Image (cartoon, rainbow, N blue to C red):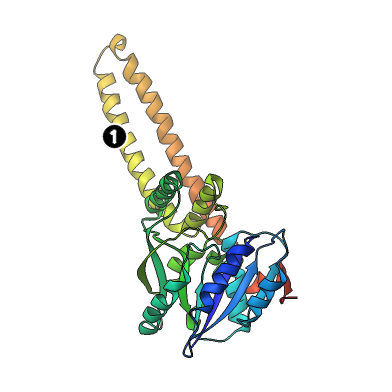
Amino acid sequence: MITWIVTPCFNDWDSLRQLLCELKLLITPESTFRVIVVDDGSTTAISNDLIEALTGFSGILLTLNTNLGHQRAIAIGLAYVEEHCAGDFVAVVDSDGEDRPSNIPILTEVAIAHPECIIVARRTNRAESTKFRIFYLLYKLFFRLLTGQNLDFGNFQIIPFSQVKRLTHSGALWNHFPAAVMRSKTVLVKVPTSRSKRYFGASHMNFISLVNHGFNAVAVFLDIVFIRLLVFFGALVAIVVTLISLIGLFAASDDYSKTWSPIVLLGLLSVALIQAIFTILATGFLLLSARSIIPLVPRKIYKDYIGRVGNS
């Protein structure tokens, strides 16, 4: 059984070295790992000993021309696998150590039992600071509120080769890998795992990065978000119209000296009604405009971002 490991890396070569060491311990006569490292435009060069370690896995180093972020680096890695590689499974693993390689055999066993499903590692806890966990909880709540779905897994996944093509031909993969997997309509099997601490250093994910990450995830479900917003603003319009009618009746039944405050409120509600209607129309036109644009399909464009393929 051959499993290709796709892992993005940006300057974190020490963590990658530790990841390769732990992967080496998992190799058995029945299971072989081959590694594709996507160098996401690192500003420091990979060392010779790390190149040798990667060569021991029949590994491939994809050096990108510029930094694209780990989500797009994963998309490029998967597109390369789909065109050039053959095997049984593709495992997407972050190189920083938060996704422990020791969980790969557990996920693979589930994948063998469900050959047409994508196996995702559902996070049961996180090792980050309390501040980051609060922001991450808000991000998940924001996503649930706008899309109606629960995003409780990340990049750590086992994908059968039969499903890689489906993902790499989806424009959603260019924005957000886990959201694209959800949108692919492939059956998901969630396996509880714990997030571990990074091997070395601190995470590159800060508040700004997390907000951007969240918006990219929501963008994958833009049509669903629009329908939910349409229902919300429709209910808001109904409430405002009802209030305007009630206030109008109240103001008409009293003398002018006692109706100045209802009249002011009537004006404010009328403004709110107009804004709600224009918001619905503007959002609808934006969605229709977006649907007319051909999406960026990773399988078609990934080569433009690869500066070098190989370990030399």
SS state under label 1: helix
Residue 250 placement, left or right of 112:
left
Residue 241 placement, left or right of 65:
left
Q: Nearer the viewer, residue 274 or 225?
A: 225
- In this rendering, the count of numbered labels is 1
Where residue 236 appears, as percent x and y from the top left, is 35, 40
Q: Is residue 41 above or below residue 252?
A: below
Where residue 160 appears, as percent x and y from the top left, is 47, 81
Q: Indicate the amino acid at tag 1.
A: Thr
Q: Nearer the viewer, residue 121 or 15?
A: 15
Tell me the residue at 33%/43% (across/down). 235
Q: Is residue 128 above or below residue 76?
A: above
Residue on which the image places disc 1: 242
Tell me the residue at 36%/69% (across/down). 190
* Location of the C terminus (image quadrant): bottom right
Residue 137 placement, left or right of 87:
left
In the picture as drawn, the residue positioned furthest to the bottom comes out as: 29
